[in-house]
Image (cartoon, rainbow, N blue to C red):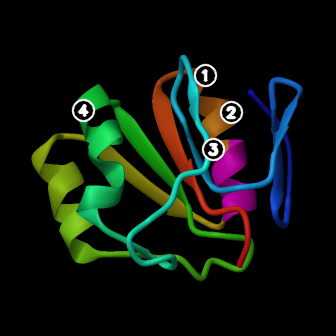
Amino acid sequence: MIDQYEFGRIVIDGKEFTQDLIVFPDKVKENWWRDQGHLLQVDDLNEVFFSKPEKLIVGTGFSGLMEVTDAVRRKVAELGIELIEKGSKEACAAYNEEKGKAVLAIHLTC
């Protein structure tokens, strides 16, 4: 459960994080780095694809500056995963609504 999100900071189940991360139903992958900071590519999500979630929610940043590539969109469609792209604040709310049925990949700044 995401308790709070603000620019550069997220609190999940009472624990604070200040770097981008991926939230799985059963764990948090801290310090998530992408090959190109504001460009989300297929290789950045290999661990997500391996886990085969029903939904992937991408938090594109406080101002929505992280871009999701068409290759990512094609890959999630190929795997039958529903992709939801939202600004990070809205992505946190969407993740909480899913109650363990989704993975959240979130950019905390920009």
> Mark 2 near mark 3, Cβ–Cβ under 8 Å?
yes
What range of the chain is rendered magenta? 88-93
Q: Name the residue under label 1.
A: 99
Q: Mark 2 points at which residue?
A: 96
- As for residue 21 lying within the magenta part, the answer is no
Mark 1 lies on a secondary structure that is loop
- Using the rendered image of the protein, determine whether residue 27 is visible from the camera's viewpoint: yes
Amino acid on which disc 3 is placed: Ala
Q: Name the residue under label 3.
A: 94
State whether the magenta stretch is mostly helix, strand or loop: helix
- Using the rendered image of the protein, determine whether residue 52 is visible from the camera's viewpoint: no
Foreground mark, 4 or 2? 4
Q: State which tag comes first along the sequence, 1 or 4.
A: 4
Q: State which tag comes first along the sequence, 4 or 2.
A: 4
Q: Which residue is drawn at 30% across and 75% down?
A: 69
> Residue 11: which quarter of the image?
top right
In the image shown, does 19 or 41 lie closer to the viewer?
19
> Mark 2 near mark 1, Cβ–Cβ under 8 Å?
yes
Structural distance between the alpha carbons of marks 2 and 1: 6 Å
Q: State which tag comes first along the sequence, 4 or 3.
A: 4
Structural distance between the alpha carbons of marks 3 and 1: 9 Å
**Residue 50 disc label:** 4
Structural distance between the alpha carbons of marks 2 and 3: 5 Å
Amino acid on which disc 4 is placed: Phe
Q: Is residue 7 left or right of residue 59?
A: right
In the image shown, does 42 or 76 lie closer to the viewer?
42
Structural distance between the alpha carbons of marks 1 and 4: 20 Å
